[in-house]
Image (tube, grey):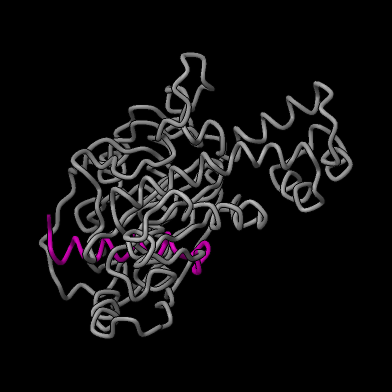
């Protein structure tokens, strides 16, 4: 990126950013590297996550082009630092963004929630921040998984796979205590594993067909439900939601809990697709911890439990024995903490 600063392991401050399609959250942390070193020195011991010194939330707003968001985000970061009285300090910034990235310069290949394609957002933000705010972008799920690894559901495990199901589906991997980002920063894009190879398979937001996300991502699942119910599919879902326009995936889960035939048939299709994809990832990566999370999955307990029960069906004893499947713990703070911790580490030990 265009802004640079002399790396220093003594820099106490770091900003974590969670940039989504609707809201942006900023948090200022102090001494994260020290806290993380203490955590690694006590493997398996649960330690409370570091508290942020200051946090700010605002809406992305209507002016959503990448350049405008970069300028507003930089201004928000400077206000946060001014409020904390550390404007003059060298402060690294880690940004977790709901996007597929390309390379390590902060280029956004695709962010459906923000409506961006092929935007050099990292360089825009670096230019807006200046040299005393070295910045790096991370896929939002990578940041979340790293936060959970450090202080949440991944504590005690050096090899962690996290899969989060919300509007879309994303994954992140920590192997031997190191975040794995891949050759072009596109590792563990598990939502785009192909589960339907037909030429007319459902279209995904990535531009491909037959991706897991095209079936099980929250937005795509909601569209399917509304379309089928509007076409006359009988189900208690309409009674739960009130109208077709108000149907959500959560209504599907409630219907499944009531043994609704349509909901159960939907799960008979979805669960094997999700569980087999997770199992294939376990075969390839051999983690000791599989963390499941995301807004949709956490609000759908019937679906979540069926997935957890189904994953071992596709595995052998060698993969199952070291594996524990757990739920996310840090909720919305995971991404803030993970992006801040990654930024602090990369400033102290540059790539």
Residue in the image at 24% along x and 60% along y: 175
Residue in the image at 38% along x and 59% along y: 145
Where residue 272 sits, quadrant-wise, is top right
- In the image, residue 334 lies in the stretch drawn in magenta: yes
Please indicate, yes or no, whether residue 81 appears anywhere in the rendered image.
no
Residue in the image at 29% along x and 34% along y: 120
Left or right: where 242 falls relative to 208? right
Where residue 191 sits, quadrant-wise, is top left
Q: Position of residue 305 (x, y in %)?
A: 61, 58
Kindly give the residue lying farthest to the top in the view shown: 199
Please indicate, yes or no, whether residue 24 appears anywhere in the rendered image.
yes
- In the image, residue 107 lies in the stretch drawn in magenta: no
Where residue 119 sits, quadrant-wise, is top left
Residue in the image at 44% along x and 70% along y: 153
The answer to whether residue 35 is above or below residue 8 is below
What's the magenta region?
328-351
- Return the residue nearer the eye: 264 or 125: 264
Left or right: where 267 falls relative to 315? right
Q: Position of residue 337 (x, y in %)?
A: 39, 66
């Amino acid at each position: 990126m265009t802004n640079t600063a002399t790396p220093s392991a003594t820099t106490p401050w770091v900003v974590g950013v969670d940039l989504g399609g609707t809201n942006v959250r900023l948090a200022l942390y102090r001494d994260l590297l020290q806290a993380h070193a203490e955590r690694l020195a006590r493997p398996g011991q649960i330690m409370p996550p570091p508290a942020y010194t200051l946090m700010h939330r605002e809406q992305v707003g209507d002016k959503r082009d990448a350049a405008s968001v970069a300028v507003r985000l930089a201004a928000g970061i400077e206000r946060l630092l001014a409020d904390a009285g550390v404007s003059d300090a060298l402060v690294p910034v880690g940004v977790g963004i709901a996007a597929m990235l390309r390379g390590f310069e902060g280029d956004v290949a695709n962010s459906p929630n923000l409506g961006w394609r092929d935007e050099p957002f990292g360089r825009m933000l670096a230019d807006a921040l200046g040299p005393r705010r070295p910045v790096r972008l991370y896929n939002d799920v990578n940041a979340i998984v790293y936060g959970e690894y450090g202080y949440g559901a991944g504590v005690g495990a050096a090899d962690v796979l996290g899969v989060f199901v919300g509007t879309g589906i994303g994954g992140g991997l920590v192997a031997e205590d190191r975040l794995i980002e891949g050759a072009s920063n596109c590792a563990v894009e598990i939502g785009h594993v192909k589960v339907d190879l037909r030429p007319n398979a459902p279209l995904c937001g990535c531009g491909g067909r037959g991706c897991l996300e095209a079936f099980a991502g929250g937005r795509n699942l909601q569209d399917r439900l509304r379309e089928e119910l509007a076409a006359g599919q009988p189900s208690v879902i309409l009674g739960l939601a009130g109208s077709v326009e108000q149907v959500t995936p959560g209504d599907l889960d409630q219907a499944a809990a009531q043994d609704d035939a349509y909901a159960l048939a939907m799960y008979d299709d979805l669960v094997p697709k999700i569980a087999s994809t997770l199992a294939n990832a376990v075969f390839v990566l051999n983690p000791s911890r599989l963390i499941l999370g995301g807004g949709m999955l956490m609000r759908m307990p019937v679906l979540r439990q069926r997935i957890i029960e189904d994953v071992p069906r596709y595995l052998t004893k060698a993969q199952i024995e070291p594996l524990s499947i757990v739920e996310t713990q840090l909720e919305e703070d995971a991404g803030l903490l993970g992006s801040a911790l990654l930024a602090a580490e990369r400033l102290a030990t540059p790539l």
